[in-house]
Amino acid sequence: MRIQKTLIAIGAAGMIALTGAGCGDDKAEDTVKTLQEQGEKLQERGQALQDKAARLQQDYRDGKITAEQLQEELERDARAIQEEATDATSDAIDNLKDADIPDEAKDQLDEAQKQLEEATR
């Protein structure tokens, strides 16, 4: 469940990047660039977590770890990724709300904020 929430937060970050892209406001463009860079890092961390999950599942099948150990380790790592994605997304929303962007983009920001809030409950 935590991994799904993490992916939702990353998706919200992607929506925000699209919202601010090409609007001509320097602050928005800087925010989008930063968010895109953070999004790439988060995707890499997400892939690394999937790889780790596969290794841990094999360790579980081999009797090296318990199911509880597997779950605790994955939950901890997923929580860290989710928190990073949430922070990056919240910062981007705050920065873009102050930028000179079209009303349609502001509506998309509101939608992304709602998705982020739902994902972090």
Image (cartoon, rainbow, N blue to C red):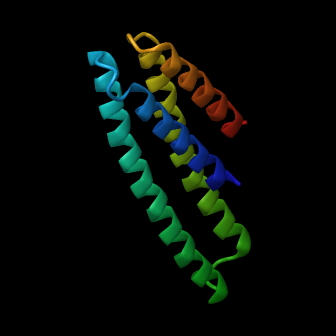
Viewer-side residue, 107 vs 38: 107
- Position above or below: 47 against 4: below
Q: Residue furthest bottom?
A: 62
Residue at horizontal 52 percent and vertical 78 percent from the top: 55
Where is residue 93 shown, x and y percent of the image? 49, 22
Residue at horizontal 39 percent and vertical 12 percent from the top: 99
In the displayed structure image, the side of residue 81 where residue 33 appears, left or right: left
Which quadrant of the structure image shows residue 98? top left
- Position above or below: 90 against 64: above
Query: Which quarter of the rendered picture does the N terminus lie within?
Result: bottom right
In the displayed structure image, the side of residue 26 where residue 57 appears, left or right: right
Residue at horizontal 62 percent and vertical 55 percent from the top: 3
In the displayed structure image, the side of residue 93 where residue 59 appears, left or right: right
Where is residue 62 shown, x and y percent of the image? 62, 89
In the displayed structure image, the side of residue 25 where residue 44 appears, left or right: right
Q: How many marks?
A: 0
Viewer-side residue, 100 vs 45: 100
Query: Which quarter of the rendered picture does the C terminus lie within?
Result: top right
Which quadrant of the structure image shows residue 116? top right
Where is residue 53 shown, x and y percent of the image? 56, 70
- Position above or below: 25 against 57: above
Where is residue 29 shown, x and y percent of the image? 30, 24
Residue at horizontal 60 percent and vertical 62 percent from the top: 73
- Position above or below: 80 against 99: below
